[in-house]
Image (tube, rainbow, N blue to C red):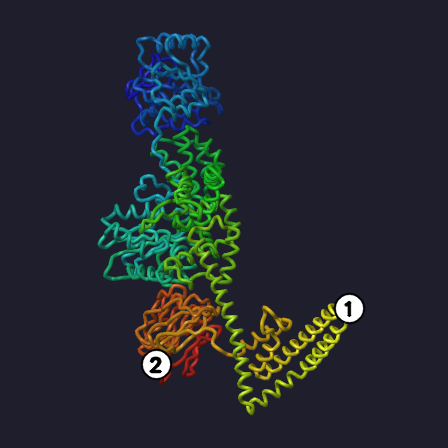
Amino acid sequence: MIHFAYPDVDTEEDQFSGCGRYAVSESVPEGYDLPFAKILNRSKVSDAALILAKDSSDKEIKDQVIQKKGEKYIGESLHLAYLFALIHRSREVKLNILTDIWTTGSIEVSDGKPFLKSVKHEGFQLKLEKGFLSEENEDMLFIVPEGDIQPEHEDLCSKNNAEILSFEAFRDCLSKDKEIFQKKIIVKVREDELFALVSLIFELGPNPYKGLEYFDEEDADRFFGREDVTEKLFEKYQTLQDSPIRLMAILGPSGSGKSSIARAGLIHKIRHSADHQDIVFRPGGYPLKAFTEELAKNNPSDPDVILVDQFEEIYTQCKDEAERNQFVRNLLHASSDEDSRVSVIIILRTDFLKQTKNHHPELYNAIAENEIIVKAMTRNQIRSVITEPARRSGYIFDMETVDRLISETEKHEGALPLLEFALDSIWKGMEKEGVQPADTLEKLNGVGGALASRAQEIYDGLASDTDRRIARRAFISLINIGEGAFDTRRRVLLSQIVAKDESSEHVRNVLQQFSKTGKAYFITLSTDAEGKETAEITHEALFEHWGSLKQWLDEKRDDLPFIHRLEKASSHWKNQDKPDGLLWRTPDLDSLKDYHRHNKQDMTELQHVFFEASVEAEKREEAEKEAIRQRELRYARDIAEEQRKRAEEQEEAGKKLRKRFIFALGFALIAILALIAAVSGFLKATEQTGVAEQEQNKAEQERDKALRNQSLQLVVSAQTEMEKGNIVTGMMLALEALPKNMSAPERPYVPEAENKLYESVAYFREPLVVIEGDKPFVYAVFSPDGKRIVTGSFENIARVWDTETGKELVSLKGHEKSVVYASFSPDGSRIVTASWDNTARLWDNDTGEQLAVLEGHEGGVDCANFDYDGKRIITASSDKTACIWDAYNGKQLAIMKGHEDDIAYAAFSPDGKYAVTGGGSVSESEDNTV
């Protein structure tokens, strides 16, 4: 052990003795609570003797050291050697020095005013020259009050190969050179440098705070303030084995400490109370996969406890409704299986109870039976959170700092992560820079500003505007916009953050500035089960309190749902081998073009490829439409020509047509006669010399005018014929009004004639798109937006087609017999099919994935329809029953009996209160169910 020596004061092991007025103690009491830590805060340096006297177990010393006079304290001095010796009992010395460290001076309490007391000049001169600088003394470091150093000491030290350094210079030398004790060093310190000096000399204990991380089971020894709720949870857990459903929920708002309570509190207590196996995991976007992987990793044959942390992720991150429902069913089954002993514990934010009630009522009811709500912490509990971990690491906060931390935390929902982050920052300030807690807290602008200040500091310190743009895009992409609820974090693949002209390494380096491997722990970087890199905001408190991020979110809030939809669509397109049918068309493509125009530099490589492919597909389809338009025009001409020939060949049958035609051309004849007259005038005019050119132009203008009038009259006649139902005649008249050759027109072009021609073609019913299957179709229906058609056939497969191109988009495979009916949900996202295999099946319209099988009929299912809001399905069957089903999980809700024969059709009323079946019976109930 290094001794902290003062001349004429012996300091050996635990024995301290002294002379003069210095307070001494023969031994430090066992279990001493290290009161020196209280002294080291600047506001309390002056109270050193007072605190030691109060805490001393030696009443005689206490009585001798201090006496109270009014509100001021007069007491003995505390020698620095004694202070450092006390500290050394619990902390290691960081300095690379093997000899003892000399000190002089003392902390004196006088009229309540602090100062670092120097010794008399003559006394210090003697101690320095005859003691420390003597050849017999091998010690290399002497710490003295700044007031003791006089100009003549500089020459004295220089002659004896010693150096006088200020505290700042000494600290700088240590940071640059660990081997600085090649000559003797005298360090002069001021009173306000004492705290930093202690931090420089001694190792501070390990950081007991977690920042934004939750406390896990291995952190139980530094998890304080939640003993009461942990005990309640454990008692509730012990009663689960007697419950029909062994499921309990830990509920609370974001930032209330639910995860830490469950992991460092409850799970730790469960494991240490019995030999229990547990599985602890977060569901993420793929809850079934997450559970399977965690089970395989821990390999318990039969877990006693399944803890699902961040349960709300099944709503915010899992986009597969079928997987979400199956996951919930598995939990309910595991917790209710009489042959099993497993208990299920879920951790859920209270603002997501509504989603649970709406989508999983059985789970909601189970939660209501066994729930513990995490309440706000009391002042004493918050005090334990602050002080107890520090005490375990050898430090005691001053009360002013503790009181400020408490007052800025209590009654503020979700403030616990902010408190932990502030404490973590305070500890790092003491550990690395010797900054006092009060100073760090002030610099952070208190508990509420700690998180935002640090995040903003890192953001502002990024190397370039490009890096800051990457950081902005990353943080925004890691947030789910709440629809009627709070915003939540989301885990995203790193590849979904990297823009087209960026490298993954560059983006990773930027994010690492905000991660545990960098300067903070705002972003968690990890890998998923497939080895792909992911990023996630560590705690939602960040985007609730960081002003810049809130501003970015407000600016992008309207765009984020579109951005997330683009991510999903482009990824699905890629995973399905990039079919044209999954590319975007108008109006989605119009929105994508606008987004690309303003946010091109923030789009990923895949999003760019998806955009370009969609644009190219649009161009191809426009070209195809133009080709179809030209074919229609040629088709119209061919029809007109064919009709003309028929009229000539079948004179008797064509009399009526010719009469109509002659009548229709009656008005046009006048125009033709006018044309002849104009031409005649023109010929006569040409005979006249001197005005030939002028008359020719005039004649051409008159001719064009006459032909234009003729064409317009033909258009009127075409309209008249079409209104009578004579579509072909109207088509012929419109065609007659158009030039035969547009490159060298023999008559003026009249757009009204072309429009009328297209109109006649539209009324002339011929198939525009032909959809062909391998076997006959038995049913076909449009989607609500008219962009898709679903067909049923005798080949046991339903298929989804593009209405514009006739291309197959998705095959719905799963039925074992003919698919005889199909319908879309009101929002077009799902399809229900009915089959003679006695089932109806629910499908995803985009992917073709089977979501649920509606089993229960004993005969073929002839019909299946959604209700008005897409939450229920009604089916009709040859087993003489109709059934109502949950349109999300396929669960049977009701059976309608009464028909004496097959039921061919069933449907809901527009308001969903009634259901009508092919037999004519109508059922109604007051709770809107049938």
> Which residue is identified by label 2?
878
Q: Which of 250 and 51 is in front in this view?
A: 250
* Image quadrant where one finds the N terminus: top left
Query: For the residue marked with disc 1, what is the amino acid?
Result: Gly
Check contact, mark 2 vs mark 1: CB within 8 A.
no
Q: Nearer the viewer, residue 616 or 782?
A: 616
The span from disc 2 to disc 1 (Cα, nearest Å) is: 94 Å
x, y percent for residue 714: 64, 79
Is residue 292 positioned above or below 789 on the image?
Answer: above
Point out the frontmost of discs 2 and 1: 1
Q: Residues within 10 Å of mark 2 (few under 14, many from 20)?
A: some
Q: Residue 206 sits in which quadrant?
A: top left
* Image quadrant where one finds the C terminus: bottom left
Query: For the residue marked with disc 2, what is the amino acid?
Result: Ser
Q: Residue furthest bottom?
A: 652
Residue 228 visible somewhere in the drawing:
no
Q: Which of 901 and 17 is in front in this view?
A: 901
Q: Could you tell me which residue is drawn at 48 percent across and 70 percent down?
A: 786
Q: Could you tell me which residue is drawn at 39 percent across and 73 percent down?
A: 884
Mark 2 or 1, nearer chain start: 1
SS class, disc 1: loop
x, y percent for residue 339: 23, 61
> Which residue is identified by label 1?
690
Residue 91 visible somewhere in the drawing:
yes
SS class, disc 2: loop
Q: Residue 369 sits in which quadrant?
A: bottom left
Q: In this view, does 310 lie to the left or right of 110?
A: left
